[in-house]
Amino acid sequence: MRLFAAVLPPAPFLAELGRAVDPLLALPGAGDLRWTGRAGWHLTLAFYGEVPDDSLPELTERLTRAAHRTAPFPLALRGAGLFGGRSGGRSLWAGVAGDTRAMRLLADRAEAAARRAGLPTEEHHRFRPHLSLARSRTAPVDLGPYVAGLDGFTGSEWTVGELALVRSNLPRSGVPGEQPRYETVAAPPLEGAG
């Protein structure tokens, strides 16, 4: 099964972001982007890829320990940015504000949980908290107007209280625009002990 660890913002905070994103869908070129499904909006902490079924119990236990050692922390969705270069980008994302240091620590712990569970991990990249909104279908495009459209967005703050282990069910129908379906497998609470 294809798994990742994430922070799942509560629905009211995603609705705030949705109201800010809606006007972007009317901008020229918006139809050329592949927009992420709102039902799947999340903040990825660690991507595990394909995980054997028999590794799930230990991974879940390791993530539970990581959550137990991490105190709840405040976050908010703010602004936007892009990946892919200054002249053109491939990915538009919403930014994150609040205790990003605690979020980075939780991401490191989620990655370490996979290693300790015996799962292969990809080369470590500097963690950059973000929520993916859209991707270019082909070559880099000018995402500047989209970033500018979200520049003033300031979402309300919430307290992150759990670490989600999420299963990604990839589209199988071949229908253009079909989105992955996400299923929360485990969600141990952040307890802040030790």
Image (spheres, rainbow, N blue to C red):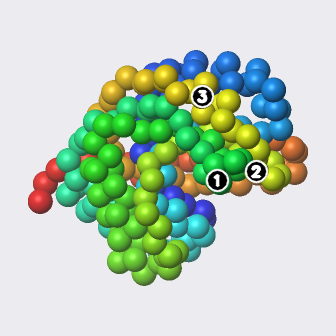
Between residue 166 and residue 90, name the one nearer to us: 90
| Badge 2 element | loop
Amino acid type at circle 1 is Gly
Residue at x 61%, y 25% (from the top left corner): 149
Assess disc 1: are there few (<14), some (14-19) or many (≥20) residues with their C-alpha within 10 Å of its C-alpha. Answer: few
Q: Are marks 1 and 2 in contact (CB under 8 Å)?
A: yes
The residue carrying mark 1 is 85
Q: Position of residue 68 (x, y in %)?
A: 22, 55
The single residue placed furthest to the right in the displayed view is 175
Q: Quadrant of the N terminus?
A: bottom right
Total numbered labels placed on residues in the image: 3
Residue 176 seen in the figure? yes
Q: Quadrant of the C terminus?
A: bottom left
Residue 34 seen in the figure? no
Q: Which mark is residue 140?
A: 2
| Left or right: residue 137 compared with residue 43 | right
| Left or right: residue 86 compared with residue 117 | right
Q: CA distance from mark 3 to mark 2?
A: 17 Å
Amino acid type at circle 2 is Pro
Closer to the chain start, of discs 3 and 2, is: 2
Closer to the chain start, of discs 1 and 3, is: 1
Amino acid type at circle 3 is Ala
Between residue 120 and residue 33, name the one nearer to us: 33
Residue 117 vertical placement versus 72 (above, below): below
| Badge 3 element | helix
Q: Position of residue 116 (x, y in %)?
A: 35, 77
Residue 147 vertical placement versus 2 (above, below): above
Assess disc 3: are there few (<14), some (14-19) or many (≥20) residues with their C-alpha within 10 Å of its C-alpha. Answer: some
The residue carrying mark 3 is 148
